[in-house]
Amino acid sequence: MHFIKVSFWSLLLIGIGLTIILYKYFVIEIPLLPNQNTKVWLIQSQVDFMGVGRPAKVSLESPKITPGFIILDEDFISNRYGFSISESKEQRILDWAVRRARGEQRLYYRVTVAKSDLPQTWKSVPPFPVKPVYPEPYKSAVEAIINQVRVASADIASFTQELLVQVNDPNPNENVELIKDRAANDRQWIQEVILLLQSVRIPARTLWGLSTAKMSNNVELTPLLQVHNGNRWFTFNPKTGEKGIPKDFLVWKIGDPPIAILEGGKNLQVTFSITESYTELIDVARKNADYMDSPFEKLSTSSLPIQHQNIYQLLLMVPLGALLVVFIRVFIGLPTFGTFMPILIALAFRETQLAWGIILFTLIVSFGLFIRFYLEHLMLLFIPRLAAILVIVIMIMLCISLTTNELGTERLLSVSLFPMVIIAMTIERMSIHWEENGVLSALGHGLGSL
């Protein structure tokens, strides 16, 4: 019966622990190993204009919903300008204002992004568009294109994809040629495609973004086409008909208004530059958890003040040390002086490093044992004897620190982090064990603890 209860609680706790680990790894993407890095991109938007000596206001659209990416950090750089952010469900606009702007003016917006699999989508439901009115002969050409596409499609997504395939055919028919003649550039062409979709009451819009695959100081926004089927938005490449947002495409803005609007100045110009670097993967994971509003982010030690985080970094090592001591004592049979003494000595070794820690531990315990056996001849009681050993241990630590300071060995200065009470108790227990069970047994327990 006891075996069944122990097995039940063991399997339950192991299952809970593994579930938490897998959730953090696969959902929040917290790395299992330390110092793992991931690629990030720094995108800079530079706004230049000429001030004319009047009050000036600049509005710049910035990314809000970024499928495939997550925003890690943002910087808004300006001189003497007031700054504010206005947001809607899908858009975000940065507003700068100054009382008087004269001569060349320059503003910066910088955003750092990283890859992310978090679900991000647009939830707005647009109204059905009004059918555009085409004069002849364009009206007949549009009707012929629509009828041909309708036959080869089944729903809004397939209709849009088939339409893009036909209008981008390298050998188009005369109807498509006629519509193409209305567009002088890529921006006007995607507007013609949107009008074709509106002819059958399909809501459509332009999605503008940047390709993070291009590291350059002059990157241009490129358009994608989005249509709504009544439940969700679908995205297509307007030139190829390929469905979905490319994995290197960072969404910047929605719709056709200009990316920046200037009042009280002239010669407005917006340029983009992209560079890539690396950051710790744990930073991206924390941002993912914050975006998901995960309870593990609120219950994580990373939400504590820094000084408390440092304390718990040590304290959370104690259960792991206890598990290791249980394993080596129960399954391997290695003797130690208690359970906590090896753990605390190991924590001290984190500062001294392993080699120097072993040397210091051996020196202090050896010298302490020598003094302890001398105190035995003085016939002291247990409490006074233990107090004397504690004082001696501290004096040994002080002598080692002073000596190594003169020799310039900074690592050995960490000897002060040794748990002196545990060392003193170890010396006392080792000496008693020596007297009761012999030198070999005492050295075996001391070596097992080390």
Image (cartoon, rainbow, N blue to C red):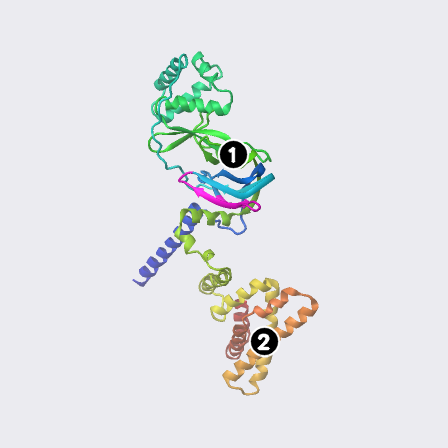
Q: Position of residue 149 (x, y in %)?
A: 38, 18
Q: Residue at x 51, y 51 (%)?
A: 33
Which mark, by number, is residue 210?
1
Q: Residue furthest bottom?
A: 379
The residue range painted magenta reads 71-90
User: Toward which corner of the image does residue 410 lie, by quadrant?
Assistant: bottom right
Mark 2: amino acid: Ile
Q: Residue at x 52, y 84 (%)?
A: 384
Which mark, by number, is residue 394?
2
Q: Quadrant of the C terminus?
A: bottom right
Query: Does the segment drawn in magenta span residue 187?
Result: no
Q: Residues within 10 Å of mark 2 (few under 14, many from 20)?
A: some
Q: Residue at x 51, y 79 (%)?
A: 432
Q: Position of residue 135 (x, y in %)?
A: 40, 15
* Mark closer to the chain start, 2 or 1: 1
Q: Quadrant of the N terminus?
A: bottom left
Residue 248 seen by the camera: no
Which is nearer the eye, 190 or 351?
190
Query: Does the segment drawn in magenta span residue 83?
Result: yes
Mark 1: amino acid: Leu
At mark 1, the secondary structure is strand
